[in-house]
Amino acid sequence: MALDTPIQVKPRTLVVLAVVAASLYLLYTSAASITGFQLRASALEASLNETKGEFHRIAEEKSQCEGFLGTMNRSLAHYETGAALLGGALGECRNRTTALDKELVVCTAATATAQDESKASHAALGACETANANLSERMQASGIYHLKIIKGAVRSVCCRPGIAAVTWDIGSEIICSGPYSMNCTSGETNYTVVF
């Protein structure tokens, strides 16, 4: 046979060849698809396993965070209780400070009043001491004058010419006998003026 001669193929053979070719093509593409699906399924399974690992890690972190959050909530409750107690103590301290401030104002006013009264008392005492000194001087002058009068009266009533000394006493009048004595010459007597 020569190469130039055309090959005759029966239509049935062509159909069988076409079906075989199509089957081979389908088988090839199916195998490639199955292989691709298997590769993608393996990749998805690896990704799923990685995601599961990530999920477990996140779940563990969440559990740790929840534990930490619980601890923090207990601490916060403890601090809030402490803050409430401190707030109460602070309020009590403020109330006491306010009361002490009021007492200080009253005490300051009482001190000012006492100082004013003390100044007035010192002024009155000074005036009284001045008046007392003046009165003492007047009484002393009056006593000296009284003694002069008494001496003159006793001398004129009890002393007679030729009598050097006499005894005498005084009540509502001068008596020429008594516990007091007088030198009739000098007028000296042991009588003293008592205030």
Image (cartoon, helix red, strand yellow):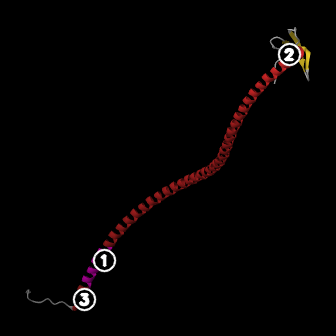
Where residue 84 sits in the image (x, y, percent)? Answer: 61, 53
Where residue 162 sits in the image (x, y, percent)? Answer: 87, 8
What's the residue type where badge 2 is placed? Arg
Tell me how far mark 3 sits from mark 2, CA to CA.
195 Å
Q: Is residue 12 magenta?
A: no
Q: Foreground mark, 3 or 2?
A: 2
Q: Residues within 10 Å of mark 1 (few under 14, many from 20)?
A: some
Residue 121 figure quarter? top right
Q: Which residue is mark 3?
A: 15
Secondary structure of the residue carrying tag 2 is: helix
Tell me how far mark 1 sits from mark 3, CA to CA.
21 Å
What's the residue type where badge 1 is placed? Ser
Left or right: where 79 falls relative to 56? right
Compare marks 3 and 2 and give the one earlier in the sequence: 3
Where residue 56 sits in the image (x, y, percent)? Answer: 45, 60
Left or right: where 178 falls relative to 63? right
Secondary structure of the residue carrying tag 1 is: helix
Instruction: Using the image, tell me which numbered label, if any, was put on residue 30.
Output: 1
Determine if residue 86 is in view.
Answer: yes
Q: Are marks 1 and 2 in contact (CB under 8 Å)?
A: no
What's the residue type where badge 3 is placed? Val
Q: Foreground mark, 1 or 3?
A: 1
Residue 53 figure quarter? bottom left
Where residue 14 sits in the image (x, y, percent)? Answer: 22, 88
- Residue at screen point 80% across, 12% down: 186
Q: Which residue is mark 2?
A: 155
* Front residue (pair 119, 55): 119
Magenta-drawn segment: 19-34
- Residue at screen point 44% across, 60% down: 58
